[in-house]
Image: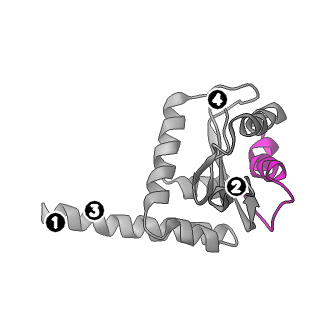
Amino acid sequence: MEILKDIVDSKHYIFCEGFSDWTEAIKAAAAPLLAEGIIENTYVDAIIENVKEYGPYIIIAPEVAMPHSTLGGSGVHDTCISFMKTEKPVVFDPNDPTKNARLFFTLAATDNEKHLSNMVALAEFLLKEGAIEDLLKAKNADDLMKAHCKSSFLFSIWELLWDFSN
């Protein structure tokens, strides 16, 4: 699965300067999915309430957040993922800078298999060397596609070398 290409092709991305607080950032990160009716505001509200209750569980790595609620949650009509990048870090915990984020991957899910596939594809992409740094530099959809192509090309070279050595 080509997660960034899918995000760009579906126009489920947004680039922003920054936000006064993390709740506004989550609302903005969900905007591409809201605009298409994939999710409703009730789902966004559930994400915000969960973060208030459980803390910033959506921070999966430094600078990276994955806003989501429960599978098949209220207000979700399809399985999808969107991307948002901010220039200024969004602060979730003022006492813990490792809980700041600039990259947001908002997940919505009705189909468990597709949802898991999206999560695996996202994890595989983010674990590739330089992927997060490339996304942090991105300014537009072309930059997202460059990051996609760079990671796909490097991964293809690695696969060729692996096959050759075995």
Nearest to N terminus: mark 1 or mark 2: 2
Nearest to N terminus: mark 1 or mark 3: 3
Nearest to N terminus: mark 3 or mark 2: 2
Which residue bears the numbered disc 3? 159
Which of the 4 image quadrants contains residue 140?
Answer: bottom right
Q: Amino acid at mark 3?
A: Glu
Nearest to N terminus: mark 2 or mark 4: 2
Q: Indicate the secondary structure of the residue bearing disc 4.
A: loop
- The stretch in magenta equals 14-36
Q: Indicate the secondary structure of the residue bearing disc 1.
A: helix
Q: Determine whether label 1 and label 2 are within 8 Å by CB.
A: no
Viewer-proximal residue, 145 or 122? 122
Q: Residues within 10 Å of mark 2 (few under 14, many from 20)?
A: some
Q: What's the distance in space between the residues labelled 1 and 2, CA to CA?
A: 38 Å
Q: Residue at the spot x=75%, y=57% of the render?
A: 94
> Is residue 76 at least partly visible in the picture?
yes
Q: Determine whether label 1 and label 4 are within 8 Å by CB.
A: no
Q: What's the distance in space between the residues labelled 1 and 4, CA to CA?
A: 43 Å
Q: Quadrant of the C terminus?
A: bottom left
Which residue bears the numbered disc 4? 70
Viewer-proximal residue, 53 or 158? 53
Which residue bears the numbered disc 2? 11
Q: Main secondary structure of the magenta part?
A: helix
Which residue bears the numbered disc 1? 164
Q: Residues within 10 Å of mark 3 (few under 14, many from 20)?
A: few
